[in-house]
Image (spheres, rainbow, N blue to C red):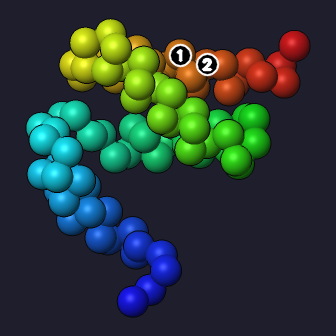
Amino acid sequence: MSEHLPPEALDEWGAVLRERLGLGPDDLPIDVILDLAADVARGVARPAAPFSAFAAGLAAGLAGGGAEHIRDAVAAVTQLAADWHAS
């Protein structure tokens, strides 16, 4: 078995995660999460991407866990990453 998941398998992996974790279709926006990770990796540092994505998910969950909460948390982290070295 390969150590890395091919990009075309992300939807399948996402479906497995959703099922196992009891999540709905809108609870795991793969593209949004990947964009967040890329923004943090470029704007801050690559190792900051996974825990930044986790922090955004945690914040969204604590705020209620809806799609709007996910968007708000991701936007906040993305803005922080954009501003990280701008000042």
11 up-or-down from 60: above or below: below
Q: Which circle marks residue 20 in the picture? A: none
Identify the residue under disc 2.
79
Q: Is residue 79 left or right of residue 65?
A: right
| Residue sitting at x 16%, y 39% | 23
| Residue sitting at x 84%, y 24% | 85
Circle 1 crowding by C-alpha within 10 Å: few under 14, some 14–19, many from 20: few
Disc 2 to disc 1: CB gap under 8 Å:
yes
Identify the residue under disc 1.
76
Q: Farthest bottom residue?
A: 1
Residue 83 quadrant: top right
Residue 38, percent across and down? 59, 45
Residue 75, percent across and down? 49, 20
Q: Is residue 71 left or right of residue 27?
A: right
Residue 68 quadrant: top left
Whether residue 11 can be seen here: no
Callout count: 2
| Residue sitting at x 71%, y 48% | 46
Whether residue 79 can be seen here: yes
